[in-house]
Image: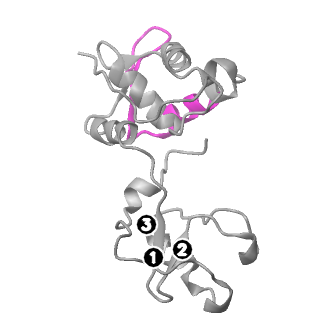
Amino acid sequence: MPLTITPSWKPLDAREKPPYSYATLIAHALLSSADGQLKLGDIYTWIAHHYPFYKLDKPGWQNSIRHNLSFNKTRFKRLVRQKKGSPWRLVKGSEKEFIRRLTIGQRHHVLNCPQTKKAVGLFSSFKHRTALPMIVTGPEDYQTKTRCAQSDDDDESPPATPEDPPFDLEQFFCFEGYQ
């Protein structure tokens, strides 16, 4: 039975890229299919139909879809068949994660630095010598790669407040690949 999932994001026009990872787009297609499985070409078609940005975009996004299916073995499973074009489906138990990503609005997270009592945003400013995002490859890197070690004198971040939401590492970092 297909699920009808209404994403929290609504585009202003067809040229606006969805804020979802490719893995989330694939899951949306699979969850919306009649039997929970689709062939690769059908996944492309579904995404292009439901997310108009991908109709307008160059076909490079399709390589990312293929890559996500092939390398996310903990989330996607290829059903082996004798003929060409085996269907893909979600690994049992991963549905809830993707439904949450589609239906909960995108939030900007702020890390609270206990050493400096200041909020630390995801992106460094030019003042901190780089405009690149902080890179965290896994939960064990979270503490070592936060910018808490920087000196207080060049950080003008606002002080952390009790109203700041708790930081949810799993929700914040997507490990399914680059967009």
Mark 1 and mark 3: span between their CA atoms?
Answer: 16 Å
In the image: residue 27, left or right of residue 50: left
* Picture colour scheme: one colour
Q: At 48% across and 67% down in the image, what residue appears?
A: 110
Question: Which residue lies most toward the left here?
Answer: 1
Question: Which residue lies most toward the top here?
Answer: 83
Seen in the picture, residue 3 relative to 141 is either above or below; the reply is above
Residue 6 on the magenta segment:
no
- Could you say which quadrant of the image residue 24 lies in? top left
- Could you say which quadrant of the image residue 145 lies in? bottom right
Residue 112: mark in rendering: 1
Mark 1 and mark 2: span between their CA atoms?
Answer: 6 Å
**Quadrant in which the C terminus appears:** top right
Residue 139: mark in rendering: 3
In the image: residue 121, left or right of residue 89: right
Looking at the rendered image, the disc whose residue lies closer to the viewer, 2 or 3, is 2
Q: What element does badge 3 sit on?
A: helix
What amino acid is found at the position of numbered circle 1 in the picture?
A: Asn
What amino acid is found at the position of numbered circle 3 in the picture?
A: Pro
Would you call the spot at circle 3 few (<14 residues within 10 Å), some (14-19), or many (20 or more)? few
Q: What element does badge 2 sit on?
A: strand
What stretch of residues is rendered in magenta? 63-88
Instruction: Please state the horizontal and vertical placement of residue 117, each as a whole percent of the image.
Output: 46, 86
Q: Earlier in the sequence, mark 1 or mark 2?
A: 1
Seen in the picture, residue 48 relative to 92 is either above or below; the reply is above
What amino acid is found at the position of numbered circle 2 in the picture?
A: Val
Q: What element does badge 1 sit on?
A: strand
Circle 2 sits on which residue?
120
Mark 2 and mark 3: span between their CA atoms?
Answer: 17 Å
Seen in the picture, residue 124 relative to 72 is either above or below; the reply is below
Residue 126: mark in rendering: none
